[in-house]
């Protein structure tokens, strides 16, 4: 059985970094599905990992990578005896710690050394450590130093993120009203800050809330569910397939040996089972 663990970042990184995490596949290979999420930074400690975004070829990063925000799930596979450590970046974390429009790596990834000159030294420090408390100290030190040199985030970012995760906005017009901008401004803002347009973001948040409900209430069969915001069962199933390339029933029937346990541990420690549901503060 794979091993995994989570740690909270330093208090000054709250709202920027969702969690630090470690995954070790153990003596068996891993084949699992992630869900849509914000950006992530991952360092390979040993073995071989691939990530295949739906509709794209599999990507392998030998040492470290920056994964941009995603609008769909991805298949994650590893050889036996593989492990990685990393952390999730919320939109404020992207703005302060990475910079540039989030759309440039939306549904994509890049070698971390092309983004952070200090990446090789950071990877070496990860390899020198041996447990998550030590990796958390390494990440805290690096990210706090980077934060001290970063420019302020756009003033509307926290408001736009808070409105997005509030759970009570169903239309782009209402989203624009909540942020206090025009629809046209919101469309430009969302592509820059979050990587996707507001309609895609609202659909994604509705899906993540539904997935969270399914994980927390596994006794409810997908065929008996009609989550909020969906017109009927066909609408729900079609949306699920658009994000995960499978039906809800088939998804729940998969072993999900990493992601199911990760969701349960994340919910127990941080109150949210999925990174995309973390609030901006």
Image (spheres, rainbow, N blue to C red):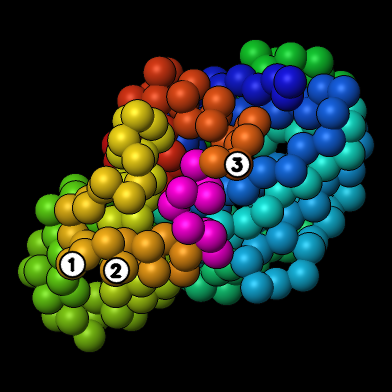
Q: Which mark is residue 254?
A: 3
Give above or below for 177 relative to 187.
above
Magenta stretch bounds: 243-252
Query: What's the CA distance linking mark 1 and mark 3?
Result: 26 Å
Query: What's the CA distance linking mark 2 and mark 1?
Result: 6 Å
Q: Are marks 2 and 1 in contact (CB under 8 Å)?
A: yes
Give above or below for 126 relative to 87.
above
2 or 3: tag closer to the N-terminus: 2
Q: Is residue 200 magenta?
A: no
**Residue placed at 14% from the left, 80% from the top?**
182
Q: Which mark is residue 235?
A: 2
1 or 3: tag closer to the N-terminus: 1
Q: Nearer the viewer, residue 163 or 24?
A: 24
Where in the figure is residue 165, as x and y percent of width and height?
A: 26, 49
Task: Give the class, few, some or many, for how many residues have Cα within 10 Å of label 2's Cα (few <14, many ≥20).
Answer: few
Q: Secondary structure at mark 1?
A: loop
Q: Secondary structure at mark 2?
A: helix
**Residue placed at 35% from the left, 47% from the top?**
222
On the question of residue 208 being in view, the answer is: yes
**Residue placed at 46% from the left, 49% from the top?**
249
Is 152 on the left or on the right of 119, as rendered?
Answer: left
Where in the figure is residue 59, as x and y percent of width and height?
A: 79, 61
Is 227 on the left or on the right of 251, as rendered?
Answer: left
On the question of residue 82 being in view, the answer is: no
- Circle 1 is placed at which residue position? 231
Q: Secondary structure at mark 3?
A: loop
Q: Nearer the viewer, residue 66 or 261?
A: 261
Secondary structure, magenta segment, majority class: helix
């Amino acid at each position: 059985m794979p091993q995994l663990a989570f740690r909270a970042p330093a208090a000054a990184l709250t709202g920027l970094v969702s969690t630090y995490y470690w995954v070790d596949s153990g003596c068996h290979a891993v084949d699992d599905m992630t869900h849509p999420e914000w950006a992530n930074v991952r360092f390979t400690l040993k073995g071989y990992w691939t990530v295949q975004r739906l509709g794209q070829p599999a990507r392998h990063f030998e040492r470290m990578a920056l994964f941009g925000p995603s609008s769909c799930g991805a298949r994650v596979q590893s050889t036996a005896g593989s492990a990685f450590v990393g952390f999730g970046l919320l939109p404020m974390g992207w703005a302060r710690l990475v910079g540039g429009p989030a759309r440039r790596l939306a549904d994509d990834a890049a070698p971390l050394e092309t983004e952070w000159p200090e990446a090789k030294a950071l990877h070496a420090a990860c390899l020198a450590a041996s447990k998550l408390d030590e990796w958390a100290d390494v990440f805290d030190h690096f990210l706090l130093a980077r934060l001290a040199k970063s420019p302020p985030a756009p003033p509307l970012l926290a408001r736009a993120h808070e409105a997005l995760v509030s759970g009570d906005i169903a239309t782009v017009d209402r989203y624009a009203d909540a942020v206090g901008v025009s629809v046209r401004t919101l469309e430009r803002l969302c592509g820059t800050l979050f990587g996707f347009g507001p309609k895609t973001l609202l659909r994604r948040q509705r899906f993540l809330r539904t997935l969270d409900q399914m994980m927390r209430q596994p006794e409810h069969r997908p065929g008996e569910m009609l989550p909020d915001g969906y017109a009927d069962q066909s609408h729900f199933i079609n949306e699920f397939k658009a994000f995960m390339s499978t039906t809800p029933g088939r998804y729940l029937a998969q072993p999900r040996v990493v992601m199911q346990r990760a969701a349960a541990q994340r919910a127990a420690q941080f109150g949210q089972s999925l990174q995309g549901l973390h609030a901006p503060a």
